[in-house]
Image (cartoon, helix red, strand yellow):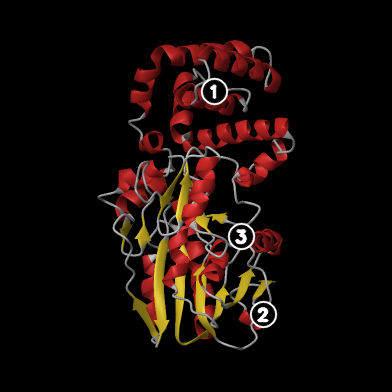
Amino acid sequence: MQGSALPAALAALAPAGDDAGGRRHALVQELAYGTLRHWGLLDALVRRLASKPFADPLLAPLLAVALYQLDHTRAPAFAIVDRAVAAAALIARPAAKGVVNAILRRYLREREALQAEVRTDPVARYSYPAWWIARVRAEYPDDGAAVLDAGNERPPLSLRVNLRVGTREALLLRFAAADIAATAAGAIGIVVDPPRPVPALPGYDEGAFAVQDLGAQLAAPLLQAAAGQRVLDACAAPGGKTTHLLEIAEVELLALDSDESRLPRLRSNLQRLRLAGDRVTVKAGDATRPDDWWDGRPFDRIIADVPCTASGVVRRHPDGKWLRREDDLRNFARQQRRIVDALWPLLAPGGRMLYATCSLFAEENEAQAEALAVRWRDALRETITFAPEVAARGGQLLPSSPGAGHNHDGFFYALFRKR
Protein backbone atom coordinates (compact mmCIF):
# COMPACT_ATOMS: atom_id res chain seq x y z
CA MET A 1 0.00 0.00 0.00
CA GLN A 2 3.04 2.31 -0.24
CA GLY A 3 2.07 5.64 -1.81
CA SER A 4 -1.65 5.04 -1.24
CA ALA A 5 -3.90 7.63 0.34
CA LEU A 6 -4.47 6.82 3.98
CA PRO A 7 -8.22 5.95 3.82
CA ALA A 8 -7.60 3.39 1.06
CA ALA A 9 -4.68 1.84 2.93
CA LEU A 10 -6.72 1.57 6.13
CA ALA A 11 -9.70 0.05 4.34
CA ALA A 12 -7.44 -2.68 2.97
CA LEU A 13 -5.61 -3.39 6.23
CA ALA A 14 -8.36 -2.92 8.83
CA PRO A 15 -11.80 -3.06 7.22
CA ALA A 16 -14.71 -1.97 9.35
CA GLY A 17 -17.37 -4.63 9.72
CA ASP A 18 -19.01 -5.95 12.85
CA ASP A 19 -18.54 -4.33 16.24
CA ALA A 20 -15.15 -5.96 16.76
CA GLY A 21 -14.04 -4.97 13.27
CA GLY A 22 -15.28 -1.44 13.83
CA ARG A 23 -13.35 -1.07 17.06
CA ARG A 24 -10.22 -2.48 15.44
CA HIS A 25 -10.58 -0.12 12.50
CA ALA A 26 -11.08 2.87 14.82
CA LEU A 27 -7.94 1.99 16.79
CA VAL A 28 -5.81 1.52 13.69
CA GLN A 29 -7.18 4.78 12.25
CA GLU A 30 -6.35 6.68 15.44
CA LEU A 31 -2.77 5.39 15.46
CA ALA A 32 -2.23 5.97 11.74
CA TYR A 33 -3.68 9.48 11.63
CA GLY A 34 -1.98 10.53 14.85
CA THR A 35 1.42 9.19 13.84
CA LEU A 36 1.27 10.96 10.48
CA ARG A 37 0.18 14.25 12.06
CA HIS A 38 3.35 14.21 14.14
CA TRP A 39 5.60 12.25 11.79
CA GLY A 40 8.31 14.91 11.54
CA LEU A 41 8.88 14.86 15.30
CA LEU A 42 8.46 11.10 15.68
CA ASP A 43 10.83 10.31 12.83
CA ALA A 44 13.46 12.66 14.27
CA LEU A 45 13.14 11.02 17.68
CA VAL A 46 13.51 7.53 16.25
CA ARG A 47 16.62 8.54 14.32
CA ARG A 48 18.07 10.21 17.41
CA LEU A 49 17.39 7.14 19.58
CA ALA A 50 18.78 4.59 17.13
CA SER A 51 22.52 3.98 17.37
CA LYS A 52 22.61 2.92 13.71
CA PRO A 53 20.17 2.39 10.80
CA PHE A 54 17.78 -0.49 11.31
CA ALA A 55 18.31 -3.68 9.31
CA ASP A 56 14.54 -4.24 9.45
CA PRO A 57 12.73 -1.37 7.64
CA LEU A 58 9.50 -1.83 9.61
CA LEU A 59 11.10 -1.13 12.98
CA ALA A 60 11.31 2.63 12.48
CA PRO A 61 7.57 3.10 11.81
CA LEU A 62 6.75 0.66 14.62
CA LEU A 63 8.76 2.79 17.04
CA ALA A 64 7.14 5.96 15.72
CA VAL A 65 3.67 4.54 16.44
CA ALA A 66 4.76 3.53 19.94
CA LEU A 67 6.19 7.00 20.62
CA TYR A 68 2.93 8.55 19.44
CA GLN A 69 1.01 6.37 21.87
CA LEU A 70 3.32 7.29 24.75
CA ASP A 71 2.80 11.01 24.16
CA HIS A 72 -0.78 11.26 22.92
CA THR A 73 -2.86 8.41 24.35
CA ARG A 74 -3.92 7.31 27.82
CA ALA A 75 -2.63 3.77 27.45
CA PRO A 76 -0.20 2.76 30.23
CA ALA A 77 3.43 3.11 29.20
CA PHE A 78 4.27 -0.46 30.22
CA ALA A 79 1.50 -1.83 28.00
CA ILE A 80 2.64 0.24 25.02
CA VAL A 81 6.22 -0.95 25.43
CA ASP A 82 5.18 -4.59 25.86
CA ARG A 83 2.98 -4.56 22.75
CA ALA A 84 5.65 -2.83 20.66
CA VAL A 85 8.23 -5.41 21.76
CA ALA A 86 5.86 -8.25 20.86
CA ALA A 87 5.11 -6.66 17.48
CA ALA A 88 8.82 -6.33 16.74
CA ALA A 89 9.20 -10.09 16.90
CA LEU A 90 6.27 -10.54 14.52
CA ILE A 91 7.21 -8.02 11.83
CA ALA A 92 11.00 -8.24 12.04
CA ARG A 93 13.00 -10.88 13.96
CA PRO A 94 13.15 -12.07 17.57
CA ALA A 95 16.37 -10.16 18.27
CA ALA A 96 14.57 -6.91 17.46
CA LYS A 97 12.60 -7.22 20.70
CA GLY A 98 15.60 -6.13 22.76
CA VAL A 99 16.30 -3.16 20.48
CA VAL A 100 12.72 -1.88 20.66
CA ASN A 101 12.53 -2.39 24.41
CA ALA A 102 15.79 -0.49 25.02
CA ILE A 103 14.85 2.43 22.75
CA LEU A 104 11.41 2.95 24.26
CA ARG A 105 12.62 2.71 27.85
CA ARG A 106 15.37 5.19 27.10
CA TYR A 107 12.78 7.55 25.64
CA LEU A 108 10.70 7.32 28.80
CA ARG A 109 13.77 8.23 30.87
CA GLU A 110 15.01 11.09 28.65
CA ARG A 111 11.81 12.29 26.98
CA GLU A 112 12.07 16.02 27.70
CA ALA A 113 15.74 16.33 26.77
CA LEU A 114 15.32 14.33 23.56
CA GLN A 115 12.31 16.35 22.44
CA ALA A 116 14.07 19.64 23.14
CA GLU A 117 17.07 18.49 21.14
CA VAL A 118 15.25 17.38 17.98
CA ARG A 119 12.78 20.29 17.97
CA THR A 120 15.57 22.65 16.93
CA ASP A 121 14.97 21.25 13.42
CA PRO A 122 11.88 22.91 11.83
CA VAL A 123 10.72 19.63 10.27
CA ALA A 124 10.64 18.04 13.73
CA ARG A 125 9.18 21.15 15.36
CA TYR A 126 6.27 21.53 12.91
CA SER A 127 5.95 18.03 11.40
CA TYR A 128 5.77 19.13 7.76
CA PRO A 129 8.23 18.79 4.86
CA ALA A 130 10.84 21.54 4.76
CA TRP A 131 9.49 23.04 1.52
CA TRP A 132 5.98 23.27 3.01
CA ILE A 133 7.24 25.04 6.12
CA ALA A 134 9.24 27.51 4.02
CA ARG A 135 6.22 28.38 1.87
CA VAL A 136 3.86 28.87 4.79
CA ARG A 137 6.39 31.05 6.60
CA ALA A 138 6.92 33.16 3.48
CA GLU A 139 3.23 33.56 2.66
CA TYR A 140 2.05 34.05 6.25
CA PRO A 141 4.88 35.95 7.96
CA ASP A 142 2.69 36.89 10.94
CA ASP A 143 0.67 33.66 11.20
CA GLY A 144 2.98 30.95 9.89
CA ALA A 145 3.57 29.10 13.15
CA ALA A 146 -0.12 29.21 14.07
CA VAL A 147 -1.15 27.96 10.61
CA LEU A 148 1.28 25.04 10.79
CA ASP A 149 0.32 24.12 14.35
CA ALA A 150 -3.40 24.28 13.55
CA GLY A 151 -2.92 21.72 10.80
CA ASN A 152 -1.68 19.21 13.39
CA GLU A 153 -4.76 19.46 15.60
CA ARG A 154 -7.64 16.99 15.62
CA PRO A 155 -10.48 18.34 13.49
CA PRO A 156 -13.97 18.82 14.93
CA LEU A 157 -16.98 16.85 13.77
CA SER A 158 -18.97 19.57 12.02
CA LEU A 159 -22.46 19.07 10.66
CA ARG A 160 -24.58 21.20 8.35
CA VAL A 161 -28.27 21.17 9.26
CA ASN A 162 -30.57 20.37 6.35
CA LEU A 163 -33.19 23.08 6.73
CA ARG A 164 -35.47 21.28 4.30
CA VAL A 165 -35.86 18.56 6.91
CA GLY A 166 -35.85 20.50 10.19
CA THR A 167 -34.34 23.29 12.23
CA ARG A 168 -31.03 23.46 14.02
CA GLU A 169 -32.79 24.00 17.34
CA ALA A 170 -34.84 20.84 16.93
CA LEU A 171 -31.78 18.78 16.02
CA LEU A 172 -29.85 20.09 19.01
CA LEU A 173 -32.73 19.04 21.24
CA ARG A 174 -32.60 15.54 19.78
CA PHE A 175 -28.87 15.36 20.43
CA ALA A 176 -29.34 16.55 24.00
CA ALA A 177 -32.04 13.94 24.60
CA ALA A 178 -29.57 11.29 23.42
CA ASP A 179 -26.90 12.69 25.77
CA ILE A 180 -24.76 13.86 22.84
CA ALA A 181 -22.76 17.04 23.49
CA ALA A 182 -23.27 19.43 20.59
CA THR A 183 -23.20 23.19 20.07
CA ALA A 184 -24.41 25.56 17.37
CA ALA A 185 -21.68 27.01 15.15
CA GLY A 186 -21.75 29.23 12.10
CA ALA A 187 -24.99 30.00 10.29
CA ILE A 188 -26.50 26.50 10.25
CA GLY A 189 -23.74 24.31 11.65
CA ILE A 190 -23.41 22.02 14.66
CA VAL A 191 -20.20 20.76 16.24
CA VAL A 192 -20.37 17.40 18.03
CA ASP A 193 -17.74 17.08 20.73
CA PRO A 194 -16.46 14.50 21.34
CA PRO A 195 -16.95 13.12 17.82
CA ARG A 196 -19.12 10.05 17.38
CA PRO A 197 -19.86 7.65 14.52
CA VAL A 198 -21.99 9.73 12.19
CA PRO A 199 -24.55 7.07 11.16
CA ALA A 200 -25.43 6.59 14.85
CA LEU A 201 -26.39 10.25 15.35
CA PRO A 202 -30.11 11.11 15.67
CA GLY A 203 -31.52 12.33 12.37
CA TYR A 204 -28.95 10.67 10.13
CA ASP A 205 -31.35 8.30 8.38
CA GLU A 206 -33.90 11.09 7.91
CA GLY A 207 -31.33 13.31 6.19
CA ALA A 208 -31.44 15.94 8.94
CA PHE A 209 -27.80 16.87 8.46
CA ALA A 210 -24.69 16.44 6.33
CA VAL A 211 -21.10 16.24 7.51
CA GLN A 212 -19.33 19.37 6.28
CA ASP A 213 -16.57 21.55 7.68
CA LEU A 214 -17.69 24.99 8.85
CA GLY A 215 -15.40 26.62 6.30
CA ALA A 216 -16.89 24.58 3.46
CA GLN A 217 -20.36 25.61 4.64
CA LEU A 218 -19.53 29.18 3.63
CA ALA A 219 -19.18 28.33 -0.07
CA ALA A 220 -22.69 27.76 -1.42
CA PRO A 221 -24.28 30.90 0.10
CA LEU A 222 -21.66 33.07 -1.65
CA LEU A 223 -23.25 32.28 -5.02
CA GLN A 224 -26.62 33.77 -3.98
CA ALA A 225 -28.46 31.18 -6.04
CA ALA A 226 -32.16 31.76 -6.69
CA ALA A 227 -35.06 29.50 -7.63
CA GLY A 228 -35.17 28.52 -11.29
CA GLN A 229 -31.51 29.20 -12.02
CA ARG A 230 -29.20 26.73 -13.76
CA VAL A 231 -26.23 25.79 -11.59
CA LEU A 232 -23.10 23.78 -12.35
CA ASP A 233 -21.02 22.17 -9.62
CA ALA A 234 -18.02 21.31 -11.78
CA CYS A 235 -16.01 19.16 -9.35
CA ALA A 236 -18.92 17.94 -7.29
CA ALA A 237 -18.09 14.68 -5.47
CA PRO A 238 -18.74 13.81 -2.69
CA GLY A 239 -21.51 16.40 -2.86
CA GLY A 240 -21.17 18.76 0.09
CA LYS A 241 -21.61 21.93 -1.95
CA THR A 242 -24.08 20.32 -4.35
CA THR A 243 -26.45 19.35 -1.57
CA HIS A 244 -26.03 22.70 0.19
CA LEU A 245 -27.02 24.56 -2.99
CA LEU A 246 -30.11 22.39 -3.33
CA GLU A 247 -31.05 23.09 0.27
CA ILE A 248 -30.74 26.83 -0.34
CA ALA A 249 -32.80 27.19 -3.53
CA GLU A 250 -34.96 25.25 -6.01
CA VAL A 251 -32.36 25.28 -8.77
CA GLU A 252 -31.70 23.11 -11.80
CA LEU A 253 -28.31 21.61 -10.99
CA LEU A 254 -25.70 19.61 -12.87
CA ALA A 255 -23.27 17.83 -10.53
CA LEU A 256 -20.19 16.94 -12.56
CA ASP A 257 -17.11 15.00 -11.54
CA SER A 258 -14.26 13.55 -13.57
CA ASP A 259 -13.98 10.47 -11.34
CA GLU A 260 -16.95 8.21 -12.01
CA SER A 261 -16.07 6.01 -9.02
CA ARG A 262 -16.93 8.90 -6.69
CA LEU A 263 -20.42 9.45 -8.08
CA PRO A 264 -22.21 6.65 -6.16
CA ARG A 265 -21.36 8.39 -2.90
CA LEU A 266 -22.68 11.69 -4.29
CA ARG A 267 -25.94 10.02 -5.36
CA SER A 268 -26.22 8.36 -1.95
CA ASN A 269 -25.86 11.73 -0.22
CA LEU A 270 -28.54 13.23 -2.45
CA GLN A 271 -30.91 10.38 -1.58
CA ARG A 272 -30.28 10.44 2.16
CA LEU A 273 -30.73 14.23 2.32
CA ARG A 274 -33.95 13.94 0.28
CA LEU A 275 -32.60 16.19 -2.45
CA ALA A 276 -32.57 13.86 -5.44
CA GLY A 277 -35.11 14.62 -8.15
CA ASP A 278 -35.73 15.66 -11.73
CA ARG A 279 -34.00 18.98 -11.24
CA VAL A 280 -30.68 17.30 -10.35
CA THR A 281 -28.40 15.59 -12.86
CA VAL A 282 -25.27 13.70 -11.81
CA LYS A 283 -22.78 13.08 -14.57
CA ALA A 284 -19.19 11.94 -15.06
CA GLY A 285 -17.21 14.41 -17.14
CA ASP A 286 -13.99 16.35 -17.46
CA ALA A 287 -14.55 20.01 -16.58
CA THR A 288 -11.88 21.01 -19.10
CA ARG A 289 -13.88 19.40 -21.97
CA PRO A 290 -17.39 20.90 -21.92
CA ASP A 291 -18.15 19.66 -25.44
CA ASP A 292 -18.40 16.16 -23.96
CA TRP A 293 -21.20 16.98 -21.50
CA TRP A 294 -22.58 20.54 -21.94
CA ASP A 295 -25.94 20.99 -23.65
CA GLY A 296 -25.15 24.53 -24.81
CA ARG A 297 -27.41 26.34 -22.36
CA PRO A 298 -25.50 28.82 -20.17
CA PHE A 299 -25.37 28.50 -16.40
CA ASP A 300 -26.41 31.24 -14.00
CA ARG A 301 -24.09 29.97 -11.27
CA ILE A 302 -20.93 27.84 -11.36
CA ILE A 303 -18.86 26.39 -8.53
CA ALA A 304 -15.33 25.51 -9.56
CA ASP A 305 -14.06 23.69 -6.48
CA VAL A 306 -10.88 22.72 -8.30
CA PRO A 307 -8.35 19.95 -7.51
CA CYS A 308 -5.51 21.25 -5.35
CA THR A 309 -2.81 20.24 -2.87
CA ALA A 310 -5.44 20.09 -0.08
CA SER A 311 -2.93 21.90 2.11
CA GLY A 312 -5.75 23.52 4.10
CA VAL A 313 -7.30 20.24 5.25
CA VAL A 314 -4.25 18.31 6.47
CA ARG A 315 -5.66 18.01 9.97
CA ARG A 316 -8.28 15.73 8.39
CA HIS A 317 -5.87 14.15 5.88
CA PRO A 318 -2.42 14.17 7.51
CA ASP A 319 -0.98 11.82 4.90
CA GLY A 320 -1.36 14.61 2.34
CA LYS A 321 1.54 16.68 3.62
CA TRP A 322 3.92 13.74 3.29
CA LEU A 323 2.61 12.59 -0.11
CA ARG A 324 2.76 16.02 -1.74
CA ARG A 325 5.86 17.38 -3.49
CA GLU A 326 6.58 21.02 -4.24
CA ASP A 327 6.29 20.33 -7.98
CA ASP A 328 2.66 19.36 -7.37
CA LEU A 329 1.83 23.04 -6.88
CA ARG A 330 2.76 23.92 -10.45
CA ASN A 331 0.93 20.90 -11.81
CA PHE A 332 -2.24 21.75 -9.91
CA ALA A 333 -2.00 25.41 -10.95
CA ARG A 334 -1.94 24.41 -14.63
CA GLN A 335 -4.94 22.13 -14.14
CA GLN A 336 -6.84 24.82 -12.24
CA ARG A 337 -6.26 27.32 -15.03
CA ARG A 338 -7.49 24.87 -17.66
CA ILE A 339 -10.67 24.25 -15.65
CA VAL A 340 -11.64 27.88 -15.10
CA ASP A 341 -10.79 28.83 -18.69
CA ALA A 342 -13.07 26.03 -19.92
CA LEU A 343 -15.91 26.95 -17.56
CA TRP A 344 -15.99 30.74 -17.82
CA PRO A 345 -17.54 30.79 -21.34
CA LEU A 346 -20.37 28.61 -20.02
CA LEU A 347 -21.48 31.32 -17.57
CA ALA A 348 -24.39 33.57 -18.56
CA PRO A 349 -23.95 37.36 -18.52
CA GLY A 350 -24.69 38.56 -15.01
CA GLY A 351 -23.94 35.10 -13.65
CA ARG A 352 -21.53 34.29 -10.86
CA MET A 353 -18.69 31.78 -10.62
CA LEU A 354 -17.06 30.78 -7.34
CA TYR A 355 -13.45 29.66 -7.57
CA ALA A 356 -12.68 27.50 -4.54
CA THR A 357 -9.84 25.40 -3.16
CA CYS A 358 -8.99 23.72 0.13
CA SER A 359 -5.44 25.06 -0.18
CA LEU A 360 -3.32 27.54 1.75
CA PHE A 361 -0.85 28.32 -1.03
CA ALA A 362 -1.12 31.56 -3.01
CA GLU A 363 -0.02 29.90 -6.25
CA GLU A 364 -3.29 27.95 -6.23
CA ASN A 365 -5.40 30.71 -4.74
CA GLU A 366 -4.85 34.46 -5.00
CA ALA A 367 -2.50 34.13 -7.96
CA GLN A 368 -5.12 32.16 -9.86
CA ALA A 369 -7.87 34.64 -9.00
CA GLU A 370 -5.80 37.62 -10.12
CA ALA A 371 -4.83 35.90 -13.35
CA LEU A 372 -8.42 34.97 -14.17
CA ALA A 373 -9.50 38.61 -13.87
CA VAL A 374 -6.73 39.57 -16.31
CA ARG A 375 -7.45 36.82 -18.88
CA TRP A 376 -11.22 37.35 -18.90
CA ARG A 377 -11.99 41.04 -19.40
CA ASP A 378 -15.67 40.49 -18.70
CA ALA A 379 -14.90 39.06 -15.21
CA LEU A 380 -15.62 41.37 -12.29
CA ARG A 381 -14.27 40.13 -8.97
CA GLU A 382 -16.68 40.71 -6.12
CA THR A 383 -15.72 41.46 -2.53
CA ILE A 384 -16.21 38.61 -0.05
CA THR A 385 -16.91 39.45 3.58
CA PHE A 386 -17.04 36.82 6.30
CA ALA A 387 -18.41 37.05 9.84
CA PRO A 388 -15.94 38.43 12.42
CA GLU A 389 -15.46 35.03 14.06
CA VAL A 390 -14.16 33.52 10.79
CA ALA A 391 -10.35 33.66 10.64
CA ALA A 392 -9.73 34.97 7.12
CA ARG A 393 -7.40 37.16 5.07
CA GLY A 394 -9.64 38.34 2.26
CA GLY A 395 -10.88 35.16 0.58
CA GLN A 396 -8.32 32.98 2.36
CA LEU A 397 -9.63 31.07 5.37
CA LEU A 398 -6.93 30.11 7.85
CA PRO A 399 -7.23 26.78 9.69
CA SER A 400 -8.46 27.29 13.22
CA SER A 401 -6.88 26.33 16.51
CA PRO A 402 -8.89 24.41 19.14
CA GLY A 403 -11.41 26.57 20.95
CA ALA A 404 -11.98 28.94 18.04
CA GLY A 405 -15.51 30.29 17.81
CA HIS A 406 -15.63 29.20 14.17
CA ASN A 407 -13.38 26.12 14.02
CA HIS A 408 -12.78 25.51 10.31
CA ASP A 409 -10.24 24.15 7.87
CA GLY A 410 -8.23 26.22 5.42
CA PHE A 411 -10.10 27.23 2.25
CA PHE A 412 -9.89 29.89 -0.44
CA TYR A 413 -12.80 31.59 -2.20
CA ALA A 414 -12.86 34.08 -5.04
CA LEU A 415 -16.21 35.19 -6.49
CA PHE A 416 -16.58 36.55 -10.03
CA ARG A 417 -19.52 38.06 -11.87
CA LYS A 418 -19.72 38.14 -15.65
CA ARG A 419 -20.39 41.64 -16.93
For the point 43% across and 57% down, which residue is it? 215
Q: Amino acid at mark 2?
A: Trp
Residue 317 seen = no
| Disc 3 residue crowd, few under 14, some 14–19, many 20+, Cα 10 Å | some
Q: Quadrant of residue 130?
A: top left
Residue 293: mark in rendering: 2
Which of 122 and 70 lies nearest the eye of the viewer? 70
Which of 119 and 366 lies nearest the eye of the viewer? 366
Image quadrant in which the C terminus is located: bottom left
Query: How many labels sit on residues?
Result: 3
The percent coordinates of residue 397 (x first, y second) are 37, 57
Residue 257 seen = yes
Asked if 312 appears above or below 294 in the picture, the reply is above
Left or right: 113, with 51 as reference point: left
For the point 44% across and 43% down, which residue is it? 129
Quote the CA–CA distance across marks 2 and 3.
19 Å
The percent coordinates of residue 26 (x first, y second) are 62, 34
Q: Amino acid at mark 3?
A: Pro
Quote the CA–CA distance across marks 3 and 1.
34 Å
Q: Which residue is mark 1?
A: 66
Residue 238: mark in rendering: 3
Q: Earlier in the sequence, mark 2 or mark 3?
A: 3
Image quadrant in which the N terminus is located: top right
User: Is label 3 or label 1 in front?
Assistant: 3
Asked if 390 appears above or below 123 in the picture, the reply is below
User: Is label 2 or label 3 in front?
Assistant: 3
Quote the CA–CA distance across marks 2 and 1.
51 Å
| Disc 2 residue crowd, few under 14, some 14–19, many 20+, Cα 10 Å | few
The percent coordinates of residue 319 (x first, y second) are 54, 43
Q: Which residue is situated farthest in the left direction here?
A: 142
Give the secondary structure at mark 3: loop
